[in-house]
Image (cartoon, rainbow, N blue to C red):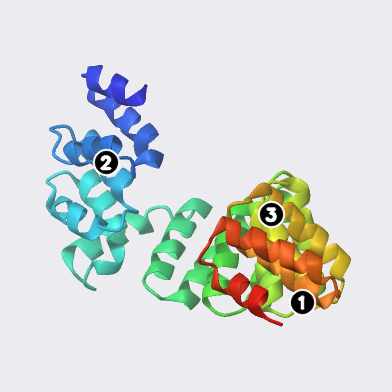
Amino acid sequence: PALAALARENVPAWRATLLELLAPHVTETAVRTVMETALRAADPLERAAAVRGLANQPDASVVLRPLLADPVRLVRLDAAWALSTELPADSPLRLELDAYLQLNLDQPGGLVRVGMDLANRGRLDEARGKLELAASRDSTSTDINLLIGQLLVMQHKPAEAAARYWLAASARPTDAEAPYRAALAYAEAGQTAGAENALRLTVARDPSRDRAWYNLGLLLAAANRLPEAIAALAEAEKISPASPDYPYAAATVYLRAGDRPAARAAAIRALNANPNYAPAERLLAAP
């Protein structure tokens, strides 16, 4: 419907709005085509919307580079933001983008944008300083804690990252992504109790998260809680029967529990999901 509306619409502002609505579907061929066409639109609102829509695509560097020379500042800034890591230090475009970002440093959102830009350029300590300042000025924004957690992961500080993700999860009672990120960070930090709590919260909030059930099963198996591990892996397999990882993991747990028939049955299910799944083939070939 949005593509059809865009084909009929003549008002540039509405066309730009429709492009924004289409942006999440930019990997679809028809959407990608209208986005690329809009890069050459007469109106800068359309060009800017297309730049934002294509900013995260793998070929953004090639597709958006001509827009760095756009005569309209709005378009240039959106293109410069998308290609920030490629702008030479002290180049006119880098200086123009930096000057724009400095305008809103009195607001948490402005601090976050500067922090994200610094992080993208590898200046992680400076980035964290900006994000921490933003968080201190807006204690209600859980998104900032998610960003800080992501930054701490990049700095190889999983325990601190887990704490930030858990803080965000506590403030987002229906969100399953924040506790899942917390679980992965807790696991990396070797804090298995925290990882289990976070994984259980994840599946409580979103029971369809097969990967969370799988990770919970592996965690429980590592703790030698085999019946609980098998139950968690069964949930993962039920949600995503096309994945061979889940029945194979269950097969290894059944072997540890001394139930060879169940282990063989699980390995066969793994091969049914993927006939070339070598780990399951080796398990079945073992004496």
Q: Quadrant of the N terminus?
A: top left
Residue found at x 87% / y 65%: 227
Disc 3/disc 2 C-alpha distance (Å): 35 Å
* Identity, as a three-letter code, of the amino acid under mark 1: Gln
Give the foreground label among 3 and 2.
Answer: 3
Give the foreground label among 1 and 3.
Answer: 3
* Identity, as a three-letter code, of the amino acid under mark 3: Glu
Q: Quadrant of residue 28?
A: top left
Dot placed on the residue nearer the N-terminal end, 3 or 2: 2
Q: Please name the residue that numbered disc 1 is placed on.
A: 191
Residue 121 appears left or right of 216: left
In the drawing, what numbered circle is on residue 237? 3
Disc 1/disc 3 C-alpha distance (Å): 26 Å
Disc 1 is placed on an element classified as loop
Disc 2 is placed on an element classified as helix
In the drawing, what numbered circle is on residue 124? none
The percent position of residue 83, horizontal first and vertical second, equals 27, 60
For the residue pair 116 and 280, the one nearer the viewer reads as 280
For the residue pair 180 and 92, the one nearer the viewer reads as 180
Residue found at x 32% / y 44%: 53
Q: Please name the residue that numbered disc 2 is placed on.
A: 32
Can residue 75 be seen here? The reply is yes
Q: Quadrant of the C terminus?
A: bottom right
Dot placed on the residue nearer the N-terminal end, 1 or 3: 1
